[in-house]
Amino acid sequence: MITRRLAQCLLALTFCLAFSGCASWFSSDEQDPAVHLVRVEVVRAKLLEQRFMLHFRIDNPNDSDLTVRGLEYRIHLGDILLAEGEHEHWITVGPNSSRFYKVPIRTNLWPRVKDLVKQLKSPEQAIPYRLEGEMETGLFIAHYVHLARNGVIIPADLIPE
């Protein structure tokens, strides 16, 4: 009877000690990485399909590796939703360093061509853009970093002289 009671106490103590280490998985003093949209590259532009490559720079301010699992995104030009989707590609950003992350996107602007032409009528006028999304990080347990970037595009700057 005493050995059975001792075995139960030892088993309970083992579980408490084993699972106390799991608590550190959920709380962390690490900072979120900084994500910057560096460049938008036009890969191919046809009438019914446009392909772009988004170039992001991910800055890891922490003293440990950062594993990036993927990115969910929505891109608006003015009030027009240009593209939305998910890109699952794993990379590792070293401690206190930066790394580039490329996201290919494909869209069809044909249904919105009237709205785009209205916005492009005066090439000197700035058009606001908005990038929203979530970057999934973490090796075993996922952590989501929310992204929200705003800016302006001046069409005249993109037209070669």
Image (spheres, grey):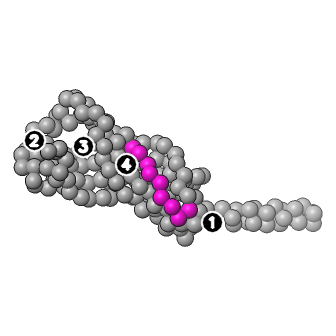
Image x and y of residue 153, in percent: 20, 53
Q: Nearer the viewer, residue 116 or 18?
A: 116
Name the residue beneath numbered marker 2: 117
Name the mark nearer the viewer: 2 or 3.
2
Q: Is residue 74 visible?
A: no
Q: Is residue 53 magenta?
A: no
- Inspect the image, locate mark 1, and give the three-letter code of the amino acid beneath it: Ser
Q: x and y percent of residue 91 in the render?
A: 52, 48
Compared with residue 50, is residue 159 higher up or lower down, i.e. above or below?
below
Residue beneath disc 3: 82
Marks 2/3: CA–CA distance = 14 Å
* Secondary structure that dominates the magenta span: strand
The residue nearer to you, when weighing 71 against 142, is: 71
- The quadrant holding residue 16 is bottom right
Q: Which residue extends farthest front? A: 161
State the residue at coordinates (32%, 58%): 148
Mark 4 or 1: in front is 4
- Disc 4 from disc 1: Cα separation: 33 Å
- Compare marks 1 and 2 and give the one earlier in the sequence: 1
Q: Amino acid at mark 2?
A: Val
Choose mark 3 or mark 4, whichever is in front. 4
Mark 2 or mark 4, earlier in chain: 4
Residues in magenta? 95-103
Quadrant containing the C terminus in the rendered view? top left
Residue visible at 47% across and 54% down? 99
Left or right for 48, reference 23: left
User: Few, some or many C-alpha atoms within 10 Å of disc 1 (few <14, some 14-19, many ≥20)?
Assistant: few
For disc 1, the marked residue is 24
